[in-house]
Image (cartoon, grey):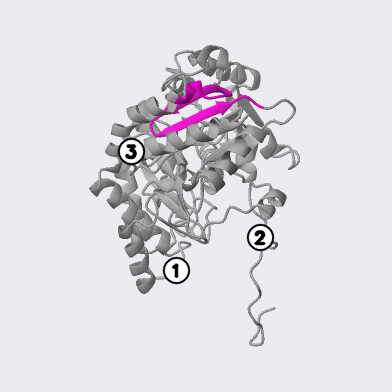
Amino acid sequence: MLDVETSPVPNDLEAFWLPFTPNRHFKREPRLIARAEGLHYITPDGRRILDSSAGLWCCNLGHAHPAVMEAIREQTKRLDFAPTFQFAHTGAFELASRLRELFPGDLDYAFFTNSGSESVDTALKIALCYQRAIGQGTRTRLIGRERGYHGVGFGGISVGGIANNRKFFGTLLTGVDHLPHTLDLEHNAFSRGQPKWGAHLADALERIVELHDPSTIAAVIVEPVAGSIGVYPPPVGYLERLREITAKHGILLIFDEVITAYGRLGTGSAAEYFGVQPDLVTTAKGLTAGTMPMGAVMVRRHVYEAIVEASTAPDWGIELFHGYTYSAHPMSTAAALATLETYRRERVFENAAALAPHFEERLHALRDCPNVIDIRNIGLMGAVQLAPRPGAPGARAYEAMCRGFFEHDIMLRITGDTIALSPPLVCTREDIDEMTGRLRAILEKID
């Protein structure tokens, strides 16, 4: 209860339930952050922690970039909030226009969200709405991929393929099927960039189509590079084959680029990097470089026109019954515009592309470290996979993360027994050397 008599409560660790975190252990040995600047987090006691994961794949400009911080500060003086249901502010249109120019082909329309999870659920709903709008209302089935991560909404975990994200939450959405994942250490271990083996795995989509009939399938959603599971670059030819099959059967192809969009591969999007044109692209994270919550779904012209321009609703009728209170929030919009301009002015994508070969070399140099069973990379994304301890999967990488924070002043992101690196795109060769050097020191201590 809040009233004038309420006094401040003491700060402790109990009340905050941390997401995707072993809360019991964390609250015994907390890894706390007080502020950040450049490529470092700073702890309450003043230690500088090197950020090897761009926060959570999002802080592409490092931390507290002055141009973005100033844009947010200035926006607070002009407009704190404006609804985008039946009204709008000018910044939202400016940002949508900037994104239209960034994404390839006719991905010309932006629907704004607040996160990657919301972007995924939005894209799935747009896909279903599109099929209905063109008279294909029987197309309700959605196809994801094993080990895929598409956020934590019910749509996202239904098409996602990570067991722990699914098994606790009931039956999820019906009418969902999954492609096989593309990681095969027998054929692809220690591949540099795209593995040569595995394009044929896309042909599993033909079997799924044969099983269910194309008249029942609305969309296929995949991460062009599976990120959260531990960086699975697509095999050479795999995405092209998916595009071929989906186009043949009238199925929409959705690229989940929450991680890969905005420079992670050295280009504006994975669609641009791989030269494959999806029908929808989900984005978030790098859109504001982690400074404010925001996402966007980029939509091809024919999808938008089928739902909006060809609508049979009267002029005052809504075409798509979907949206969020904070869609295109003015603060987030200002942050995104400043971020995109900083990417352009400082040639951040070009820096990432130039650093990628050095990142690859330094990452694969860790092959001789104890317990390393695979290393994968593409762009400025990389993963070092460790052999699990017998009976304790995940424990080895968890120890590496804790040792990294407390003993080596580096933040590491882990998933199972895989350590994922995704440095800020403004890093240097020396920063990459420092990150991989500290990681080597950690790995050599772990049994």
SS of the residue under disc 1: loop
Dot 2 corresponds to which residue? Answer: 16
| Amino acid carrying mark 1 in the image | Phe
Q: Position of residue 387 (x, y in %)?
A: 62, 24
Quarter where residue 183 is shown: top right
Residue sitting farthest toward the left: 345
Q: Is residue 274 magenta?
A: no
Whether residue 173 can be seen here? no
Q: Earlier in the sequence, mark 2 or mark 1?
A: 2
Q: Amino acid at mark 2?
A: Phe
Foreground pick, 43 / 311: 43
Query: Quick one: SS at disc 2?
Result: loop
User: Badge 1, how many Cα within 10 Å: few under 14, some, many 20+?
Assistant: some
Q: Which residue is mark 1?
A: 81
Q: How many residues crowd mark 2 within 10 Å: few (<14), some (14–19), many (20+)?
A: few
Sequence-first disc among 3 and 1? 1
Let me know if residue 369 is in the magenta part: yes
Label 2, label 3: how far apart the Cα atoms are: 37 Å
Q: How would you rate the neighbour count of disc 3 (Cα within 10 Å): few for under 14, some for 14-19, many for 20 or more?
A: few
User: In the image shown, does 320 or 410 lie closer to the viewer?
Assistant: 410
- From the image, which quarter does the N terminus lie in? bottom right
Between marks 2 and 1 in the image, the one whose residue lies nearer the viewer: 2
- Does the image show residue 36? yes
Range of magenta residues: 366-388
